[in-house]
Amino acid sequence: MWTRALRSWSAAGRRGGSGARVPEGERIYAVGDIHGRDDLLRRIHDLIGADRRDHPAPGPCTVVYLGDYVDRGSGSREVLDILIREPIEADQRVHLQGNHELMMLRFLDGQDNGSWLLNGGDATLASYGVPAAWSTIHPQAVQGLSTALARELPPEHDRFLRSLELRHMAGDYVFVHAGVRPGIPLADQRPADLMWIREPFLGSTEDFGKRVVHGHTITSRPQVRANRIGIDTGAFGSGILSCLVLEGDQVRFLST
């Protein structure tokens, strides 16, 4: 059984007084780390659809996915199928690259020594019908698994993975997978930090130039700070996939 949860805060009010706004009339839905939970992705799409029907937006609707579509959960292939073949209705859909997509691509390109398998990649292999045992994590076997995955991976999945974006900006917000490095202008951020950083980003109170919306670091509930909003609620294990809703200066959430 799943439930619908909504929370609302003013971005200029109780939660740090950031005053951040999205473009006038636009509504943005930002979806956290999915990690192979195709069931939760379908549910959050249903919640977004219901929210749009119940609360029509005056202008365009954008859906931003923060990355980490694959690994850990059992439905990585199915998640990509939904995003590619059954896209949610929206005026704009933005798919960001997470560190797990980067690891998967490195594995496909023969640039991974097996570390991807130890970080949930074995579940992704299984979803494509490529079984992997811990005893197979040595160079020759890893190469064999990489070749087998490339053979089973639909061409549209490969194109999707290689077309992912690193950031999306809208109004006073920037959307990235992991975060940004304090003290570095947004235009000069390193891709590695956008996909991997935790500290010193998470503990920083610095104004990054825009309010950062990110996933990557699991918390039991979304974290709302004046300079950032974190929405990775560990969907693969918790069953809670969170979606941030931004409109004007308002901040609220949908969750499975």
Image (cartoon, rainbow, N blue to C red):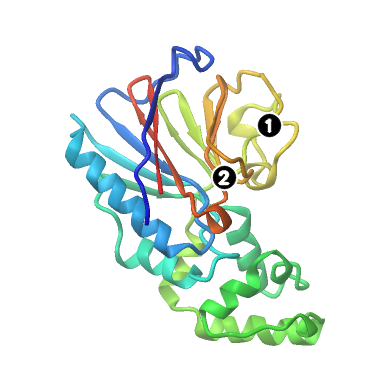
Where, by quadrant of the figure, is residue 230 drawn? top right
Q: Secondary structure at mark 2?
A: loop
- Marker disc for residue 1: none
Up-down relation of residue 91 to residue 129 (above or below): above
Q: Quadrant of the N terminus?
A: bottom left
Going by the image, does 235 lie left or right of 24?
right
Counting from the top left corner in percent of width and height, residue 41 is at 40, 57
Counting from the top left corner in percent of width and height, residue 171 is at 40, 25
Q: Residue at x 65, y 66 (%)?
A: 120
Up-down relation of residue 80 to residue 215 (above or below): below
Total numbered labels: 2
- Indicate which label's residue lies in the foreground, 2 or 1: 1
Provide the residue designation for mark 1. 202
Q: Residues within 10 Å of mark 1 (few under 14, many from 20)?
A: some
The residue closer to the viewer here, 77 or 185, is: 77
Going by the image, does 107 lie left or right of 95?
right
How far apart are the two marked residues, 2 and 1, measured between alpha carbons?
13 Å
Q: Residue at x 78, y 87 (%)?
A: 140
Q: Residue at x 51, y 62 (%)?
A: 162
Where, by quadrant of the figure, is residue 121 drawn? bottom right
Mark 1: amino acid: Leu
Q: Residue at x 58, y 41 (%)?
A: 220
The residue closer to the viewer here, 253 or 196, is: 253
Pointer 2 and pointer 1: residues touching (CB < 8 Å)? no
Q: Residues within 10 Å of mark 2 (few under 14, many from 20)?
A: many
Counting from the top left corner in percent of width and height, residue 85 is at 31, 67
Up-down relation of residue 218 to residue 204 (above or below): below
The residue closer to the viewer here, 168 or 42, is: 42
Provide the residue designation for mark 2. 177
Q: Secondary structure at mark 1?
A: loop
Mark 2: amino acid: His
